[in-house]
Image (cartoon, helix red, strand yellow):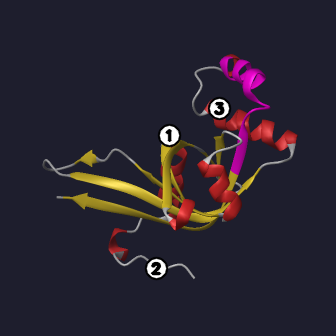
Amino acid sequence: MFREMRRIKQALSGGECVKLLKEEKRGVLAVSGDGGYPYAVPIDFYYDEEENAIYFHSAQKGHKIDAMKNCDKVCFTVMNGGEQREDWSYYVKSVIVFGRAAPVTDPDIKLKKLRAFGMKYYPSKEELEKELTIDLERVELMRITVEHMTGKLVHEK
């Protein structure tokens, strides 16, 4: 169902893909948007390694949410900033995930995952808890169940 990577020599291992998903702060979520046009938007995210799932938050209404209600199939891409090695060129790692997105409806799981998500970004637990008190009811937490994942190291020269 999913294509194999064409440039297999550039493939990252599963462990390297997981490391990138755990360390990077932003990714791009692509959905099937209005009129069949792709809609891709940068988002903050949290990768749960045990579940092999990606969590992200959203407003409860909007283009992204409407698109996922119409088609739950999504693509999510993360890349690092690259690193210079021997010369001026960069080596860039990226991960592409295909999966299905669904809202987290259980309030206990939602709170638990939002706390884990928030600790990736907030400087302290106190600040996170303050924010959760204000926004918990307004936020939509989405879960991408990973169906296929590939990673790649590209030498941009």
On residue 4, which mark appears? 2
98 to the left or right of 114: left
Q: How dense is the environment of label 2, judged by Cα within 10 Å: few (below 14), some, or many (20 and up)?
A: few
Considering depth in this image, is 42 or 118 the residue closer to the camera?
Answer: 42
Look at 50% across and 40% down and name the residue there: 25
Toward the left, the furthest residue is 87
Q: Which residue is mark 3?
A: 118
Please say if 74 is above or below 46. below
Count of all numbered marks drawn on residues in the image: 3
Question: Which quadrant, please, contains the N terminus?
Answer: bottom right
Look at 58% across and 44% down and name the residue there: 45
Helix or strand or loop: what does disc 1 sit on?
A: loop
Please say if 35 is above or below 117. below
Question: Which quadrant, please, contains the C terminus?
Answer: bottom left
Considering depth in this image, is 53 or 135 the residue closer to the camera?
Answer: 135
Q: Which residue is mark 1?
A: 25
* Picture quadrant where residue 8 is located: bottom left
Q: How dense is the environment of label 1, judged by Cα within 10 Å: few (below 14), some, or many (20 and up)?
A: some
